[in-house]
Image (tube, rainbow, N blue to C red):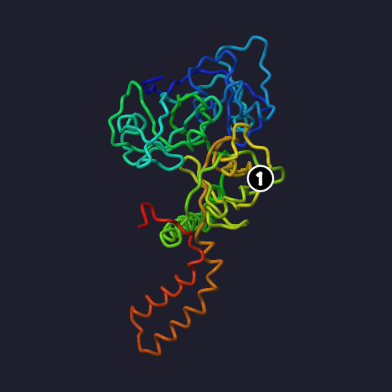
Amino acid sequence: MTDLRPPARQPVLAVVSNLLTPFPAVVLGPKFATELRLPVTGVLSDGHKDINVWVFGEESPELRNRGMAVKWPKNPLHNEIAVSRRVSDFFGPSLGQMTLTLPRAISANFRRAAVDKLPSSLEARVAPEVLKLFSPGAERGYWVLATTDSVAIPIRLVPDSTKGNLENPELRAGALLRFFLDLGEKSQVQLSPIEHVLNDRPTRNQRIVRKSVAHGKRGHAQAATAAVIRTKRRVSYALDTSLRMLFGAPSVAVVSHPASLGDDTEQIVRLHPSLFSMLGISPGDEIFVEWGGRRTVAVAFEFSPDSSMRASDSTHTGHLQALVSAQIRFDLGMPRSSALELRRRVVPKVLDNINDAFIPAVSVLIGMISLGLTGPEMVFSVLFAVYLSLLKVRVPQASPGQFV
């Protein structure tokens, strides 16, 4: 596929299966013809309502690694698909003839980027013409799903200064992204847009709003509460983003694997011990987990370095692993095995150490008052004393280039 094909809407016959996944999913039947590498994201519709779904093949590692198999009839139809329980619960008894929209996709050749133009871990440089195929207005970047024979991960396409060839598109990235894609000796990567597969369980905000509508005036207070919650989260993230400039919050890309037993119902991510110093956190701290432009919050704990990981992982990349609970995959709509970015939450880290700044700040305040300085100089001096007291929260970063 060297050209961007339009989304293909195909009539399908949906049958219920015993697939239990944290997200809505469908499995294409053994006679279903498609040139796409699976998995991809698509849209399933019954004509009245639709839902974003993950689309897997019959031999998908996502299903094979879990020991899950669909029992097809002896003579399956060419357009037959099996749906997970979440999909059947969403549509109810209306299963049967439906429409499955598969994404447009292109194939691109992976190339190593130059050191001076090396993008971040989950980014790839492409020609502006290639980026415009996915989103004509995307000038700074666009998230797509990169699919190989064994894994599907989100990568952010950023424009390169070089002019590309639409007949043979290339994406340039670092060796780490090649490892994440598990390319081996191959270089072909399928790129397709991400239709975010959201869980069908309403969030707390959605439940409050629905209850408000159902109860009329009695629900106005609950609707206001939902607005306050949304505003609080936005302000918190904006504050966190601002504090990163002062204290740092480096992001680390890791390969994700299913969580250990007992973690699936919790907002937990287990990391290799060496990652904590890279992120600037300690076990039990909060982190942002980001996948394809979406994020959630989790608590980071250690896992044993002896835990079984992907067979192709080497000792040089064994620390770039994360055990992700089903609850987090449920919130992000991501598959069991993929790649994601981790970043610490700065606000809780600062609040945990704010007591250390109390005595220096009060001392500076008293000193400034005794000198008769009560204007902007006093405010600046107190804030500077607080910042110096919180320097231990800052993640040290070396400056690039030659030192002398």
Which is nearer the eye, 273 or 403? 403
Q: Write the residue at 64% across / 9% down.
A: 75
Amino acid type, residue under disc 1 in the picture = Pro
Residue 385: x %, y % from top left = 44, 75
Residue that extends furthest to the top in the rendered view of this protein: 75
Number of numbered labels in the structure image: 1
Within 10 Å of disc 1 (Cα), the crowding (few <14, some 14-19, many 20+) is some
Residue 225: x %, y % from top left = 52, 58
Q: Write the residue at 58% across / 17% down.
A: 80
Which is nearer the eye, 65 or 216? 65
Q: Write the residue at 41% across / 36% down.
A: 173
Q: Is residue 231 left or right of residue 258?
A: left
- 103 to 390, vertically: above or below: above
Residue on which disc 1 sits: 305
The quadrant where residue 325 appears: top right
As helix, strand or loop, the secondary structure at mark 1 comes to: loop
Q: Is residue 64 left or right of residue 111?
A: right
Which is nearer the eye, 90 or 78? 78
Q: Can I make out residue 392 in this image? A: yes
Image quadrant containing the C terminus? bottom left
Residue that extends furthest to the right in the rendered view of this protein: 262
- 197 to 33, vertically: above or below: below
